[in-house]
């Protein structure tokens, strides 16, 4: 009986791995197909894309209380805005303090999904 559980568990994991691989191929196809290794703009695009997904998920399904969740969402949206400015060639207009703001937001981003 124990072998059946192991086989069932491994098949279940395989099923979900295949399922989410297909879902992610579809979801990320456009952004990954545009990636180029020689330009950092594509890293910013990917980061903005990921942050939009994370921000929407935390906003809709986050279990935190609003006083800790809302500042995180606000920082994420600000970072998305700054990254989109870079992506849309508005980065020349970014001032030094905005570049510093991007760095500061990145430094504190580790706890967004804790």
Image (spheres, rainbow, N blue to C red):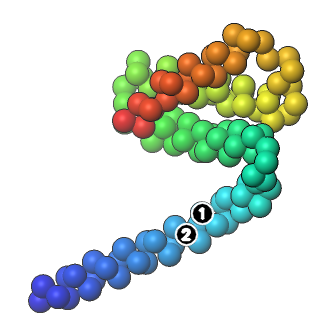
Residue 19 vs residue 79: left or right? Answer: left
Residue 97 vs residue 4: left or right? Answer: right
Image coords of residue 13 (percent x, y): 36, 74
Mark 2 lies on residue: 21
- Dot 2: element: helix
State whether residue 26 appears in this view.
Answer: yes
Q: Are marks 2 and 1 in contact (CB under 8 Å)?
A: yes
Give the position of the C terminus as an image quadrant. top left
Residue 106 vs residue 11: left or right? Answer: right
Q: Residue at x 77, y 40 (%)?
A: 41
Q: Residue at x 49, y 29 (%)?
A: 109
Q: Quadrant of residue 77?
A: top right
Mark 1 lies on residue: 24
Real-space CA distance between mark 2 and mark 1, rounded to the nearest whole angstrom: 5 Å
Residue 47, above or below 14: above
Image coords of residue 80 (percent x, y): 67, 31
Q: Quadrant of residue 2?
A: bottom left
Which of these two is toward me, 15 or 108? 108
Q: Residue at x 64, y 67 (%)?
A: 25
- Dot 1: element: helix
State whether residue 74 appears in this view.
Answer: no
Q: Residues within 10 Å of mark 1 (few under 14, many from 20)?
A: few
Residue 22 vs residue 98: left or right? Answer: left
């Amino acid at each position: 009986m124990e072998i059946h559980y192991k086989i069932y568990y491994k098949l279940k994991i395989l099923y979900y791995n295949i399922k989410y691989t297909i879902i992610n191929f579809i979801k990320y196809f456009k952004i990954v197909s545009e990636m180029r290794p020689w330009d950092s703009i594509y890293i910013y695009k990917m980061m903005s894309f990921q942050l939009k997904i994370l921000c929407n998920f935390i906003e809709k399904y986050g279990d935190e209380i609003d006083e800790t969740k809302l500042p995180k969402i606000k920082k994420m949206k600000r970072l998305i805005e700054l990254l989109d400015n870079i992506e849309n060639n508005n980065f020349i207009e970014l001032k030094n303090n905005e570049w510093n703001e991007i760095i500061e937001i990145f430094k504190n981003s580790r706890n967004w999904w804790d």
